[in-house]
Image (cartoon, coloured by chain):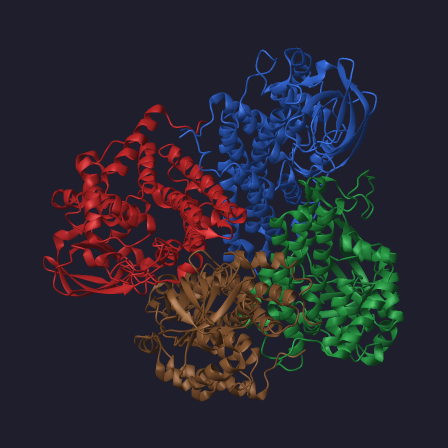
Chain colours: A blue, B brown, C green, D red
Amino acid sequence: MDFDLSSEQTQLKDGVERLVAATYGSLEQRKAQGTGPLGFSEKSWAQFAEMGLLGIPFTEEEGGFGGGPVETLVVMEALGRGLALEPYLATVVLGGGAVRLGGSDELKQRIIPGIVEGSSRLALAFTEKQSRYDLNDVATTTRKAGDGFVLEGAKSVVINGDSAQHLVVSARTSGNRRDREGISLFLVAADAPGVKIHGYATQDGGRAAEIALSGVQVGAAELIGPLDRGLPILERVCEFAIAALAAEAVGIMEALHGLTVEYLKTRQQFGAPIGNFQVLQHRAVDMLIALEQARSMAAYAAMMVEHDDAAERGAALSAVKVQINRSCRIVGQEAVQLHGGIGMTMEYLGAHYFKRLTMIESLFGDTAHHLRRVDVAGGLAAGGLAA
Amino acid sequence: MDFDLSSEQTQLKDGVERLVAATYGSLEQRKAQGTGPLGFSEKSWAQFAEMGLLGIPFTEEEGGFGGGPVETLVVMEALGRGLALEPYLATVVLGGGAVRLGGSDELKQRIIPGIVEGSSRLALAFTEKQSRYDLNDVATTTRKAGDGFVLEGAKSVVINGDSAQHLVVSARTSGNRRDREGISLFLVAADAPGVKIHGYATQDGGRAAEIALSGVQVGAAELIGPLDRGLPILERVCEFAIAALAAEAVGIMEALHGLTVEYLKTRQQFGAPIGNFQVLQHRAVDMLIALEQARSMAAYAAMMVEHDDAAERGAALSAVKVQINRSCRIVGQEAVQLHGGIGMTMEYLGAHYFKRLTMIESLFGDTAHHLRRVDVAGGLAAGGLAA
Amino acid sequence: MDLRFTPEEIAFRDEVRQFFRTEVPAEIRKKVSEGRGMTREDYITSQRVLNAKGWAVPHWPREWGGQDWTPIQRYIFTEEMLLAAVPLPLQFNCYMVGPVIAAFGNQAQKEKHLAKIANLDEWWCQGFSEPGAGSDLASLKTKAVREGDHYIVNGQKTWTTLGQYADWIFCLVRTDPAAKKQAGISFILIDMKTPGITVRPIITLEGRHEVNEVFFDNVKVPVENLVGEENKGWDYAKFLLANERTGIARIGLSKERLARIKRLAKEMPAGEGTLWDDRDFRERVAEVEIELKALEITQMRVVAAQGKRDPNKPDPASSILKIKGSQLQQATTELLLEVAGPFALAAPVRSGDLTNDWPFDYDWADAAAASYFNNRKVSIYGGSNEIQKNIIAKAVLGL
Amino acid sequence: MDLRFTPEEIAFRDEVRQFFRTEVPAEIRKKVSEGRGMTREDYITSQRVLNAKGWAVPHWPREWGGQDWTPIQRYIFTEEMLLAAVPLPLQFNCYMVGPVIAAFGNQAQKEKHLAKIANLDEWWCQGFSEPGAGSDLASLKTKAVREGDHYIVNGQKTWTTLGQYADWIFCLVRTDPAAKKQAGISFILIDMKTPGITVRPIITLEGRHEVNEVFFDNVKVPVENLVGEENKGWDYAKFLLANERTGIARIGLSKERLARIKRLAKEMPAGEGTLWDDRDFRERVAEVEIELKALEITQMRVVAAQGKRDPNKPDPASSILKIKGSQLQQATTELLLEVAGPFALAAPVRSGDLTNDWPFDYDWADAAAASYFNNRKVSIYGGSNEIQKNIIAKAVLGL
């Protein structure tokens, strides 16, 4: 049992923190990073590639650096602290994750090097108008055409879907709308005929897209994972996403808690720093408790996300999301309240942290969704640590 | 719209408060009141009768005083404040309520005068080992015998069941265990052959009983309400019980909140009254809010308990119980915490208030039970005020 | 004790209900319901509809346009307005500066302003808070120095809601720097067109321009714009803040939002059916509904007691309206956010000056998070909930 | 970073698990599990089983019976003990006075007491709190005046847990009335048989005799019973309170209670089936389980960091163990109370000296409310959660 980072991990942490501090050191910098049409900085993306961040989860054979969940945790925590806009989650964890976990060797060779070197960005298109958080709820249809498929349907709120070169799309190759069987994943070029991408700003300063698929042809080589058996891969990818989001949330909460405590020490009212008020002190402690509980669960996520037993793993990651969501809400709401008016303004970094924390709550399943998943899995008792 | 008491109601309030203050002015007095085999003071019971308290809900034709829910509220609030042990709820509201709402004229004439003058006490035997809070869950059976019935079964945690002369018993005259139809109510003499009553102390200092019914014969005249249609009467009785409990809870919470604020003002630590600590001040305010919300719902209960529409009335009373339960928990737990160790001791009145509040939470349905009932009724929107 | 309305009160309720739902434009009420920002014109249109009926300022003195309504009628009026998602008449005009001028202004001020305030011919904003004077309002620093028949005002106000539309601002300013905190403050009226005033927008976290900073650089204000006596401004401010507390819990607004949440949940697909098929969700809604019902009765207790209680003895019930009311407003926005689910991520498309056409069925979902963000303010403004609790602890509990 | 135990640690865990579940009498473990009071004999029996194995005081110095376990082994040991509902060795002996004597006592004291403390041949209780010195412990007033080779002790202690069984009491007493608060306090050992000591029971709200008041009326205590130096007692008390913090969250206990709640819910009829068929209830259990899992990892972080961190820099993770741990213990008792439902009303039948035979199937239900009542103490004792938050605000947040 050991919670220390290895020296390589510590080095990674220092490097990415330095980079984030240099590019996201202030709200103005963040605004500048997000002003381009992509909603993030291509220069920063190139720097991510240069530092090797984009290759972390891929094996060396795949062209990556063979990092594990702890490396991802380290990176995501730092990106969270900076509220970085670059599509790390979308490309490396989501799209890249699907290719990594389900792609054929040929597909991996074709796609992963581009991800790693920063020339290719991906997005995962899985939410639909009616699906809410259910990954198995897929109405996008396919029909066979030659040795490939033709896709028809629409995908909603695809994170960074308007700046990706490739989309990983879930579609139904058999069965009914909510069947677990019959879902397949396809790699679709963003500029393929019939793909219409409508990008827009998101509440947290990022980008997402509505994507219409109309007669989109994909070859058999673009299939990710076995035909009709795409759901387990999609679920795995979302487990990795939850682990990554947990780390991002911890980075944000730590920074926001720090800002809040600092504010309590400096803001003067009634002739003294407001941090002298015991009620506000205790609320800052409640935030700390929520943060530390989340930090523990982010570590738990990093451990469990590669656990073999799928049921235990699923319950564990859902439990992580429940705790992260609860902590996000406590820390975010209390931070705004303790700041008062200033915490409500776009000019204040803390407000942006709060908005991102709020959005993290609803990404990849809200509290009710994951609490139910924990229950369906029979609770957490079985899904303990390896111990 | 008017929340004032009439002059008669004010007079009643003053009278009952004086009586309670005289008999339950201290913890020692309460202990003394409860030392007899009945668990309460027969002398006090006679005084209740003398003051006319036992006749409140009965019409003048029935031998009572024609009071309504507001009069009951006034009495229960005062009894709550004193943590009075007398079986007012069991006899007047529960047993007496069943007779009043469902009894034949003959039965009423036979029973109510005894209640009013204090010579006859009743108890309502409805909970069974498997029923939890579901009034329709009745396993006690009957068989026809002559023009009467023979009862077989067992009842659990019958409040003041060991000091009643008459029991009102729910039993199944047709249908299956959980059917809404087929339940009948019977008046059973406590000393009838085959009735075995095992009394015991309850957590709140009161008394309850397990009651076994083995070949108990009851005549047709003892039927309360129509055959097979006893459930609506039982439900009405429990609605009145919730309204009464709500008032009792308000009386207790007000007293407990008062004790707590007083303690904060007098207890010294770190060279000052602990009430100087802002955190404790705010917690006392949270208690006050919970108390005032409960007070509002007790008033709502008094208004809605005689509302005509059964669905709206049911939803309203369930909503009342949910709020009362929540307030009981907040006020009770915070009171103990703000007192520290002293709040944990049997020597301290506040601890007894806390225990009674805890038990009120589980009487006639806990929070989960009533929240579900509100939902099943379609929410509260329909069940508003007459407005 | 009777919680029912009288037949007259019910008739009154039906009359105002009918009026609100037929006379106030539906598109304005939809914006209010969805928690989107209104335009300047929306405010004016809506208030003039009310004023034409004589209902913009019913709580004012009769001679200045008020109605002799009972507290219960006023309560019904406000609740019905909120239930119908009708915008309240501009608070700064009708509930703040208007009553202060009516009570403490001189005849000239009354004649000059009150009718225009009621009709929103003059748009007023509030100049109370300052960067260093929030919860501790009395520490304000903006000063007004008398020079002949003018005051020269210098300083800065902040959180000035809708100041960008305002013709006038009513300000607390320090006129006696030597006096202790509350003692040296005056209440003055300033024409926003006076040279030396700068308004700087503050964009709040939902992306909307609702509040402003207002800077005063040697602004000349005629002495006749002083309300009441010099250095007595704190008393008028207290009067203003205590004025018309019954609407503060915003019960009607929360009820309206709950009704909307139910409608939307019944349309929002989830699992095999809709979100409303999920008992857990329904029970979470019911929990808020129950608390809201309790608070509604609490509010009615306060209304019914108006004029009956000893005004020097604080009413514990009234003290909780702001705290619990704001908590429930926030709880409803949390539920709304939950309904929107994954679709809450999209940013506002139509509020304020943001545009972003979003080809999506849930055309309300983009305002869900915005509404959640915006409503964080209700536990902060008008004396934060922490300040409210301090007040209750002291005034009601004697701690 | 690796949360898994090593194979050696797993072997160790299996060994202690096996031992606890086979060697400690099942009837004692059942009492612990149900939250019923144990008899004096139960404590002694259980501790001697551990001591015979050498496991009563594994965290003590080797020469006095300790084991050279790693922090992780100690953590495993405590958690397994709680999970198996094995009573912890008497806290006052093994975690309080024992370590203090081992660290600060003289050789004679060590030889006289330590072995007996470990074997519960001597039963110790704690004399810290006083009626006027609870949260503000340093304001204690019990005084010890030196007269020749004795101290004369006068005063009163309270909340003395299990003092009715005790042979000895370790006390904080004021030996220098002139010194400031913490400075004039000494740590002394007093034989409970000494004339002048009176023990008065305090019955706590679940009806049990667990705590006492202890009165000292001119009690003569030999000077040789002073631990360490005179007037340095506060330092030893701080050492004592900081000692062995890892068990404080009582994760294992809460886990054991959750497992029991599930078992009981599966047997408790509700509706057509059992309470466990109710998804709402199961999800409420899951919520507690999730928080508990998070706290378990938090605790493991603290354990793993033992000896690695700068001891002068407070560990934010360790600070929350007491607060969150007590909240979760209380949450589990709330769930248990919910399981018992209407049957929770019946008063305890077998705890302490109460008897009340209850002819009922749910023979555990009478202890549900008692357990709920009793567990209110866990957020009060050992420094209330409010005090803990004060400490964190100051030491960790610098507020």
| Residue D123 visible, this angle | yes
Locate residue B194 relative to residue C30 in the image: left or right: left
Locate residue B163 relative to residue D271 in the image: left or right: left
Assign the N terminus of chain B to one quadrant of the image: bottom right
Assign the C terminus of chain B to one quadrant of the image: bottom right
- Residue at figure coordinates x 54%, y 82% from the top left: B105
Q: In the image, residue D379 lies at what x, y percent?
A: 40, 54
Q: Is residue B85 above or below residue C284?
A: below
Residue that lies at the very extreme toward the left in this rendered image: D148
Q: Nearer the viewer, residue A285 or D16?
A: D16
Q: Nearer the viewer, residue D11 or D389?
A: D11
Q: Is residue A296 above or below residue D234?
A: above
Q: In the image, residue C233 lies at what x, y percent?
A: 71, 72
- Residue at figure coordinates x 58%, y 69% from the top left: B297
- Residue at figure coordinates x 44%, y 34% from the top left: A384
Residue that lies at the very extreme toward the front in this rendered image: B146
Q: In the image, residue D233 lies at what x, y percent?
A: 25, 52
Give residue D316's quadrant in the image.
top left
| Residue C149 visible, this angle | no
- Residue at figure coordinates x 60%, y 26% from the top left: A232
Q: Nearer the viewer, residue A163 or C134?
A: A163
Q: Is residue B188 above or below residue C325?
A: below
Give residue A242's quadrant in the image.
top right
Give residue D78's quadrant in the image.
top left
Q: In the image, residue C123 lies at what x, y percent?
A: 84, 63
Locate residue B229 relative to residue A3 in the image: left or right: right
